[in-house]
């Protein structure tokens, strides 16, 4: 895109897109550090409003580093957290009191009396007074200098859910079902997530002198577009930030993917028509006008802001045919390549006929969820397929599920009391509230996940000998939002790749939140392949990304789609159902309650429907992949 620095007509809040979260938090940490050091020199306090969740974790890590390595002192800093679950005790591992201690306060020199977090453990009749006291405490120190925000999929800031007013103050709120669903994994089941929370109001937030809203990952892209580009509305509380005089939104490329300047830059200014952007514009036009690609006419282009495209790349019919062929060439029933055919226009090469394939799944279930039918195709077409689970997934198993599983095993085979299952079962029963899992319990939960994975892959045709569990140390030694990658992680994966020397690697996580398990798994893979470029097998290895989330890739980004017959889709659903321990952990796609197999079918059928609308052959369902090049 050329000469396009002003997006004011489209973006109602100043928004900066960074290469990644680390680059963004460096800039924000600079601004915080500058203010803190200036205030420290004159013995004045800096007042920060802080957020929780995965989004601010990279910022807190950087602030800790600057404190320990560069002497940044927080002795004159006063903090006010946005919110807290209710009811919840401060010692609960998912309380924001606990979160802030672990992620920031225990690692810097901030005085305890300078820390303010809403009390989620006070009596119900005391909540109103506590909220009023919180407001008064903010005013007493002169208000918030800087407020850090994340954004929820409902558009909430703090816990101000849809319907919150612009003038709202600190108060008790009822959490949206989508918000509680998103927290289900942290609480090991949605039924464990509190139904209420105490939050600063939108009005309280708006009183801050500066506001920074941070967001990472593709999951936040749609709500960010609405927040930034649509009129303020109480249905999206974050959109009220448009009324603030000094708010900035800092996001990474994945979170920015739905913004008009990224998705449809031709609507804003003169565009460099790259092949991928041409495909994006034409497929978007086809879906918007509800006309198949080959029925688009010049008038359709002119009336939808694409006159320049026709002038530069037209005429219309020739362009239609070109894009039709490009999209048609992404479709293949041979995800490992079709032997003994001309493969110029196929997404995968024909040679070698039998490929070595490695599928890297961050946790059990993500492989089958995204590409269960493709795995089945690869196996049936005689490719050597290895599924490698990078982590055990033990952190995602609720205690209740572990107790049920261990009781079933003990009753079935009358285990000795010294066995791992019996010991773990007893420790589960004796486990105190909020106590972290001991090694025996984690091993039991890992066993449950691994058995589920084997059962699922059996339905996809994968034999046990082709299933590997790498149990990467970053996961086994950590917990959600507290993972530290080391060389040991890269070494385990590097050994696997050197042993298998694959022609294809399927993976995910490139566009996930940087603190998430999929993102950490992707980072391990990127680091593991460094230095392998000179290997002969690596030069002929193709990397394919799958998307394990509820939403598929956008059409222009897709490089390969694999059709699923009704029977293949049904088998995939049955395979996913083997992951029983996860049935209550998976987040909702929206506020409507849907079962996981419904979401899987809906995702794959929706993709097939979009291809059908372009004028392609009609399929039951499609699984999609993007080509990834290690050099980029």
Image (cartoon, rainbow, N blue to C red):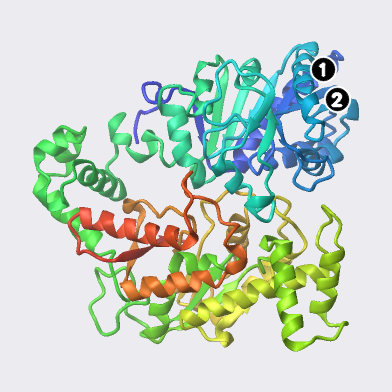
Q: Residue at point 55% right, 18% down? A: 166
Q: Quadrant of residue 44?
A: top right
Q: Residue at point 36% right, 75% down? A: 568
User: Could you classify mark 1 by the number of other residues whose Cα lies within 10 Å: few (under 14), some (14-19), or many (20 or more)?
Assistant: many
Report which residue position mark 2 lands on: 114
Residue 68 position (above or below residue 375): above
Tag in front: 2 or 1? 2
Residue 285 position (above or below residue 269): below
Q: Which quarter of the rendering shows the N terminus?
A: top left
Depth check: 179 or 294 in front? 179
Judged from the image, the secondary structure of the residue bearing numbered disc 2 is helix
Pointer 2 with pointer 1, Cβ within 8 A: yes
Depth check: 90 or 174 in front? 174
Residue 469 in sight:
no
> Which of the marked residues, 2 or 1, is nearer the chain's N terminus?
1
Q: CA distance from mark 2 to mark 1?
A: 10 Å
Residue closest to the far front: 125
Residue 75 position in % (x across, y down): 88, 26
Q: Is residue 454 left or right of residue 543?
A: right
Q: Quadrant of residue 310?
A: top left
Indicate which disc residue 344 carries: none
Judged from the image, the secondary structure of the residue bearing numbered disc 1 is loop
Depth check: 563 or 593 in front? 593
Residue 481 position in % (x across, y down): 70, 50
Residue 247 position (above or below residue 310): above
User: Could you classify mark 2 by the number of other residues whose Cα lies within 10 Å: few (under 14), some (14-19), or many (20 or more)?
Assistant: some
Residue 111 position in % (x across, y down): 90, 28
Residue 237 in sight:
yes
Q: Is residue 240 left or right of residue 204?
A: left
Report which residue position mark 1 lands on: 45
């Amino acid at each position: 895109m050329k000469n396009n620095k002003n997006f004011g007509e489209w973006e109602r809040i100043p928004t900066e897109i960074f290469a990644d979260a680390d680059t963004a938090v460096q800039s924000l940490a600079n601004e915080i550090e500058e203010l803190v050091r200036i205030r420290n020199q004159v013995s004045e306090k800096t007042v920060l409003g802080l957020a929780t969740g995965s989004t601010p974790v990279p910022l807190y890590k950087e602030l800790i580093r600057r404190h320990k390595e560069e002497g940044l002192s927080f002795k004159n800093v006063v903090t006010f957290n946005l919110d807290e679950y209710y009811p919840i005790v401060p010692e609960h591992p998912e309380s924001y009191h606990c979160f802030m201690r672990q992620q920031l306060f225990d690692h810097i020199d901030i005085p305890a009396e300078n820390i303010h977090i809403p009390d989620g453990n006070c009596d119900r009749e005391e909540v109103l007074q506590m909220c009023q006291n919180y407001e008064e405490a903010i005013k007493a120190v002169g208000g918030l200098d800087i407020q850090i925000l994340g954004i929820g999929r409902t558009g909430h800031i703090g816990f101000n859910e849809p319907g919150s007013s612009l003038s709202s103050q600190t108060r008790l709120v009822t959490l949206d079902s989508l918000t509680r669903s998103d927290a289900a994994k942290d609480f090991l089941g949605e039924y464990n997530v509190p139904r209420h929370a105490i939050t600063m109001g939108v009005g309280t937030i708006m009183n801050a002198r500066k506001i920074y809203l941070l967001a990472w990952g593709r999951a936040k892209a749609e709500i960010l577009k609405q927040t930034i580009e649509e009129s303020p509305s109480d249905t999206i509380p974050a959109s009220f930030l448009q009324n603030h005089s000094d708010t900035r939104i800092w996001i990474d490329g994945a979170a920015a993917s739905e913004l008009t300047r990224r998705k449809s830059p031709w609507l804003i200014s003169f565009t460099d028509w790259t092949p991928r952007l041409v495909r994006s514009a034409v497929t978007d036009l086809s879906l918007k006008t509800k006309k198949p690609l080959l029925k688009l006419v010049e008038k359709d282009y002119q009336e939808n802001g694409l006159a320049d495209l026709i002038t530069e790349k037209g005429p219309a019919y020739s362009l239609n045919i070109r894009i039709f062929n490009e999209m048609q060439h992404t479709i293949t029933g041979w995800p490992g390549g079709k032997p003994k055919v001309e493969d110029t226009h196929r997404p995968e090469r024909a040679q070698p006929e039998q490929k070595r394939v490695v599928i890297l799944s961050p946790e059990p279930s993500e492989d089958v969820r995204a590409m269960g039918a493709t795995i089945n195709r690869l196996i049936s077409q005689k490719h050597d397929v290895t599924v490698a689970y990078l982590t055990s997934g033990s952190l995602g198993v609720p205690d209740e599920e572990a107790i049920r599983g261990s009781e079933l095993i003990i009753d079935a085979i009358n285990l000795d009391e010294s066995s791992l299952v019996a010991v773990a079962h007893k420790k589960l029963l004796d486990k105190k509230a909020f106590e972290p899992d001991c090694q025996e319990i984690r091993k039991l939960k890992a066993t449950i996940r691994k058995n589920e994975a084997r059962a699922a892959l059996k339905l996809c045709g994968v034999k046990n000998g082709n299933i590997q569990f790498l149990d990467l140390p970053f996961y086994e030694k950590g917990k959600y939002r507290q993972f530290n990658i080391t060389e040991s992680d890269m070494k385990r994966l590097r050994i696997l790749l050197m042993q298998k020397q694959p022609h294809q690697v399927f993976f995910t996580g490139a566009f996930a939140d940087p603190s998430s398990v999929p993102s950490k798994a992707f980072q391990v893979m990127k680091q593991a392949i460094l230095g392998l470029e000179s290997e002969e097998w690596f030069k002929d290895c193709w990397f394919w990304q799958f998307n394990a989330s509820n939403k598929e890739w956008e059409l222009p980004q897709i490089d390969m789609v694999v059709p699923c017959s009704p029977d293949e889709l049904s088998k995939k659903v049955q395979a996913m159902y083997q992951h029983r321990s996860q049935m209550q952990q998976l987040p909702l796609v929206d506020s409507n309650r849907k079962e996981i197999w419904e979401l899987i079918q809906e995702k794959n059928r929706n993709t097939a429907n979009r291809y059908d609308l372009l004028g392609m052959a009609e399929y039951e369902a499609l699984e999609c992949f993007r080509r990834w090049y290690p050099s980029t």
